Image (cartoon, rainbow, N blue to C red):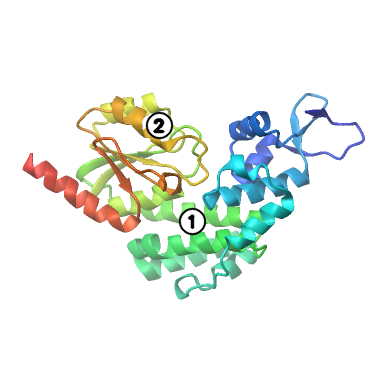
Amino acid sequence: MNELPDTAANGLPIAAVERETGIPKDLLRMWERRYGFPQPLRDSAGDRLYSQHDLSRLRLIRRLLDLGFRPGKLMKFSDEQLQQLASEHTPQRQESDVCQGLVAALKSHDAQATREYLRHRMLELGLRRFTCDFLPEANQLVGESWMRGLLQVAEEHLYSEAVSRVMRETLAGIPSGVMTPRVMLTTPPGELHLLGLLMVEALLRLEGCETIAFGAQMPLMDIAFAADKHQVDVVVLSFSAAYEGNPAAVIEVLSGQLSPAVALWVGGGGCRNLRQMPPRVQHLQQLTQLEDMVLQWRQRRVAE
């Protein structure tokens, strides 16, 4: 790592890079050690400073991670090869009827207008269709528009924040469910993404389930402790495509720590390559499966 010359232009601190790319600081440091990229400069206080080139390359790597590529492969490629890979794996997507106007709302650079657009779609479609039809399509559209340069990273951030806010506003207006299963929702250490959990929580609420959201990056021992103290029936764990850890190892450890009476449901892009699950673990591959999973859980409980 190089020391920043006094005459050099100021770079971005690691917290800003984390915010701009969605890549956790710990992961940036690990890539630096393991792959030799990024190689930030140091300021006079010894803090890391990242260049605009670093930021642009990291944004592209993050998007390719979301598409399912692994960092060890991506770090070997030049900027041109990364861009070509992104272009080859990013289809030319047109706005569907359900997402009509979304990109225009984001490009207006009006946060209030973007939230109002999303609220209107929520009211028009209802929570179930907004979650199962609109959001999966919108998430892909925004990601692919960013990849093709139609949206900037700030507009992508605006989308994520606006969707999360509208979802939370909507969930706050739904009375807490009183039916079983009682469900705890969280992510493992190193997993910052919460939108998938919000989508699952919305559908669980519509099924009348009592849900307890614990946010992101919860240590596994704490998950097991909280599941016991809150007497939950199911723990939902989410792994995004950008998750750098080993989901199978996390699942195996946590399933061994949970009480035998507690089921573990896992999902997200990071689980796409999972093949075999330990007992009591179910893989939520599509949101549309959730209603059947809840129904089957209730039927088994009645039969016991």
Image coords of residue 71 (percent x, y): 59, 41
- The circle on residue 163 is 1
In the foreground, 137 or 194: 137
- The circle on residue 233 is none
- The circle on residue 249 is 2
Image coords of residue 302 (percent x, y): 8, 44
Image coords of residue 1 (percent x, y): 77, 28
Going by the image, does 68 lie left or right of 131? right
Going by the image, does 80 lie left or right of 137? right
Which secondary structure, mark 1? helix
Instruction: Identify the residue at horizontal 34%, vertical 49% (top origin).
Output: 201
In the foreground, 265 or 119: 265
Image coords of residue 203 (percent x, y): 31, 54
- Marks counted in the figure total 2
User: Split into 4 quadrants, where in the image is the C terminus?
Assistant: top left
In the foreground, 4 or 183: 4
Give the spatial CA distance, label 2 vs label 1: 31 Å
Identify the amino acid type marked 2: Ala
For the question of whether residue 174 can be seen, the reply is no
Which secondary structure, mark 2? helix
| Residue 150 vertical placement versus 217 (above, below) | below
Instruction: Identify the residue at horizontal 83%, vertical 25% (top origin).
Output: 44
Q: Nearer the viewer, mark 2 or mark 1?
A: 2
Label 2–label 1 contact, CB within 8 A: no
Going by the image, does 67 lie left or right of 199? right
Of the numbered discs 2 and 1, the one sitting upstream in the chain is 1
State the residue lying farthest toward the left.
303
Instruction: Identify the residue at horizontal 31%, vertical 58% (top origin).
Output: 288
Circle 2 residues within 10 Å: few <14, some 14–19, many ≥20: few
Going by the image, does 39 lie left or right of 158? right
Identify the amino acid type marked 1: Val
| Residue 72 vertical placement versus 104 (above, below) | above
